[in-house]
Image: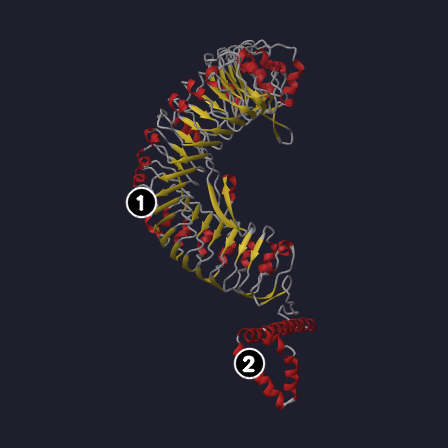
Amino acid sequence: MIDGSKVLQSIGSLPSLKTLYLSYTNFTGTVVNQELHNFTNLEELILDKSDLHVSQLLSSIASFTSLKYLSMQDSVFKGALHGQDFRKFKNLEHLDMGWVQLILSNNHFFQIPISLEPLFNLSKLKTFDGEIWAETESHYNSVTPKFQLTSISLSGYIDGGTFPKFLYHQHDLKNADLSHLNLSGNFPNWLVENNTNLETLLLANNSLFGSFRMPIHSYQKLAILDVSKNFFQGHIPVEIGTYLPGLMDLNLSRNAFNGSIPSSFADMKMLERLDISYNQLTGEIPERMATGCFLLEILALSNNNLQGHIFSKKFNLTNLMRLQLDGNNFTGEISDSLSNCRLLAGLYLSDNHLSGRIPRWLGNLSALEDIRMSNNNLEGPIPIEFCQLDYLTILDLSNNAIFGTLPSCFSPAFIEQVHLSKNKIEGQLESIIHDSPYLVTLDLSYNRFHGSIPNWINILPQLSSLLLGNNYIEGEIPVQLCELKEVRLIDLSHNNLSGYIPACLVYTSLGEDYHEEGPPTSIWCDRASVYGSPCLPTQSGPPMGKEETVQFTTKNMSYYYQGRILTSMSGIDLSCNKLTGEIPTQIGYLTRIHALNLSHNNLTGTIPTTFSNLKQIESLDLSYNLLHGKIPSQLTVLNTLAVFKVAYNNLSGKIPDRVAQFSTFEEDSYEGNPFLCGWPLSKSCDDNGLTTVTTEADTKNEEGDSLIDMDSFLITFTVSYGIVILGIIGVLYVNPYWRRRWFYLVEMAAKTNRFGALLLHIITGKRSLFYTI
């Protein structure tokens, strides 16, 4: 910080100075009026991002009688702020106090709400940008401001949710930004009707509700209207294009509008951006809109209930740069009419019911940056023409029926995301995606790729997610994988990998020595300028499809991660392979990992005690291996562990004490280890932590089991014996010859012993029955 007081004193001898920039300065000293009295011609003073002793400063610069422009945006105010401090600036036209903060003695910062009442006497004030507190404003409802603003931008919390009363007295407004103020009530038609020169009206992220009513008269000058993120409902007025024909940018997204899309949008001949996504709209895209809005550059209709074909043959939207139709019920093939959109940079068609092949003409749209067509019924191979897309950044074709091979020439220089999971794509893994230094996500899971993980994997320095699970990949895990310093998610599960687990994985971003850099700054505003569209203050960037989504299995379930959750998720899944050797102790230093799955391999050795360092681990699965030895008692310090599996190994000894998270793990976590003992297993341990000799109670249990077995035997024997007797009777009943032979044998037996006589007596009681039959 520069001492602004000294700076002002040093340049006080420049009487002709008109513009003075003193941003990032610290006015710690006392600003003396006599040092500044020569600045009689100063018109602009910029003090953005500075530390200001506000009372002293405003008192000092009051002598700047020609001052028209004063900006103190993002500054920190020290001292009290009084209304009379501003009344001296009679010629002030522009005042910017956006995001001003107040510093207290304990160095805590608070955003300071400013009442406009002290500015009511500034008759020449034209623009104001700052935070306002409507509760303060309500004390001055009877006071009419002397100014007529042309531009106002308010931030902060409006107490009670009502519009500031002074706005009802404004008639010259051209630009009004009233977003993020918690305003409630209906759409302010009065604001539009009172200010016939209004060009920009931003009301995003408030609590406005009811139907969206049109003003009484048509307004040609209104060019930008944003009412997104409110609670408007009902139909979009069918005559909206008639009343607002001059709109260039219309954002009605994230409300509760229903019904069909008005065809009167075609009357907005200047319309460049239309966003009505995240509503409940139904029906088809009006053909009249597809032919009349020929200047349209961005069309966002995503996440509604629209249906039918995307566009008919009558199509005139050749200036489209972004088309967002994802999250609807569109059917049929991708319309060939889009092949005329030579400026198209973003195509978002995910989550529909589209069918047919991927059009080859997409490769001729050289401006394409984003192609997102996941979760459809598309089929056929990826066209070789995709190799011509030099500026492609995102390719998402996941969850379709695409087959064939990925063209070997496909390696866009600026590609950042490749999502091809859940298709039928095959080919050698070594021959795809190379020379892509900006690649962040490579998802080829659930396909038919074979070969080995290429040794050149380290030439992808930005790679964060490597998802190759459920393929036919073989060979060893290359140590070059450890050179991916930014990698957070690794899924190599359900393949045929062999060899050892690389100990050097500790040198990736998952390890304890990794130093995370700050988050990258957004590039959307920069891109917006390329498209010739302004980066509006209520938007973080051009509208786009849903956020990047990555599927990863943890806690025995498969989850979809996106947005901030994706950036914070980390894990390694090497399960269901043929890996051998011991688990490297260095794996225990992957302190940033949330999920680790090494199950269903041939790993040997013991569980490393270093696993106690996995302070963020939530899921640890080591089951179905050949591990031996004890389960380290040190693991009980893992307070975030929700799933722990060591079943079906050769582990022995006492299970760790049931404390903390280990008190939640049941028998299925440990089963299949015959030499483990202790609760929750039924086997108890002796003083040495070994399985004890069978106790008397166990013997009784075994006897009980034996009795149960004997009962089962007797029941089975009786049933079988009865079936044999019934079988004999059945044969005698059916065959007369065998029946005669049977009684002959019985009679012969009766002559030789008493048992035979008894048997004859028993049988002959039924003899007459047989002969009768």
Residue 188 position within the rendered picture, expressed as x and y whole percent measured from the top left: 57, 17
| Camera-nearest residue between 623 and 98 | 623
Describe the colour scheme in one phrase. secondary structure
Estimate how packed mark 1 is, as few (under 14), some (14 to 19) or many (20 or more) residues with alpha carbons within 10 Å.
Answer: some
Q: Earlier in the sequence, mark 2 or mark 1?
A: 1
Which residue is disc 2 drawn over?
A: 740
Vertical comparison of 45 with 355: above or below: above
Question: The residue under label 2 is which amino acid type?
Answer: Arg
User: Looking at this view, is 525 or 518 the one in front?
Assistant: 525
Image quadrant holding the C terminus, namely bottom right
* Distance from Cα at disc 2 to Cα at disc 1: 85 Å
**Three-letter residue code for mark 1:** Pro
Q: Is residue 597 above or below residue 195?
A: below
Q: Nearer the viewer, residue 241 or 763?
A: 763
Left or right: 350 in relation to 663: left
Q: Where is residue 94 in the image (x, y as percent from the top left)?
A: 52, 15
Percent coordinates x, y for residue 403 in the rendering:
35, 46
Any mark on residue 407, and which?
Answer: 1
Expressed as whole percent of the image width and height from the top left, the position of residue 412 reads 34, 40
Residue 508 shows in the view: no
Element assignment for label 1? loop
Q: How crowded is mark 2: few (under 14 residues within 10 Å), some or many (20 or more)?
A: few
Q: Are marks 2 and 1 in contact (CB under 8 Å)?
A: no
Q: Left or right: where does residue 179 sit relative to residue 221?
A: right
Mark toward the viewer: 2 or 1: 2
Q: Dividing the picture into quarters, in which one does residue 380 lie?
A: top left
Establish if 463 lies above or below 227: below
Q: What element carries label 2?
A: helix
